[in-house]
Image (tube, rainbow, N blue to C red):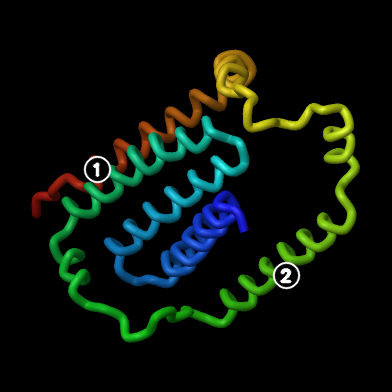
Amino acid sequence: MTIESLLFYAFACMAIVSALLLVNIRNTARALFLLFIVLFAMAGLYLFALADFIAITQILVYVGGVLILLIFAFMLSNKELLNDLQSTSKHFISLPNWQALVLAFAFLGVMVYSYISWSQHMPQWIAQSEAKGSIILPTDNNIKALGFKFMTQYVLPFEIISVFLMMALIGAAHVSRKEDDI
């Protein structure tokens, strides 16, 4: 096993375990910190997919921006919520209902079936890309091409995402402000 595959499996396990704990935890503060781990692990997985720009954007925008705003909004919103930090659950994973477990196994079955079918017979579009030599290599510089695409073809979705981020900032400020009793 090479160091690359070891790192990939470490990031994948960290993302999966943190995501499972995230959806099952009842404490909001701990859930926010688990979301930090999930987003950081996903940035590591983007690096293995040769999407270096997406990985850096993931860290800067989501981990460094939106998640920090959510943490500040949570910390400033209500002191009663902070009292839950001392209470711990007696169970490692507590599923709210059995449907979540069935759905998780269904997704696992789909992923295992896809992996087995792709390892036995590669899809035609991947084989054609390999034959043409048009696959992305680790030495390729795709950041320049992404910059041109963002500012020409995808300028409208790029601006829509910036409006969503501004809405997240306004929402965090609204949640964190103190309400006066009337």
The local secondary structure at tag 2 comes to helix
The local secondary structure at tag 1 comes to helix
Please tell me whether mark 1 or mark 2 is closer to you in this view: 2
Is 14 situated left or right of 82 in this image?
right
* Residue 182 visible in this rendered orientation of the protein: no
Q: Which residue: 45% across, 34% down?
A: 56
Q: Is residue 26 above or below residue 5?
A: below
Amino acid carrying label 1: it is: His
Q: Which residue is mark 2?
A: 109
Whole-percent x, y for residue 27 in the image: 30, 69
Which quadrant holds residue 134?
Answer: top right
Q: Nearer the viewer, residue 141 or 5?
A: 5
Q: Which mark is residue 174?
A: 1
Is 80 situated left or right of 153 in this image?
left
Q: Is residue 159 above or below residue 19?
A: above
Whole-percent x, y for residue 176 in the image: 20, 47
Whole-percent x, y for residue 121 in the image: 89, 54
Density class for disc 1 (Cα within 10 Å; few <14, some 14-19, many ≥20) is few
Q: Is residue 77 above or below residue 156?
A: below
Amino acid carrying label 2: it is: Gly
Residue at the far front: name it.
2
Q: Which residue: 41% across, 39% down?
A: 59
Q: Marks 2 and 1: in contact by CB < 8 Å?
A: no
Q: Real-space Cα distance between discs 1 and 2?
A: 42 Å
Whole-percent x, y for residue 8 in the image: 56, 53
Which quadrant holds residue 152?
Answer: top right
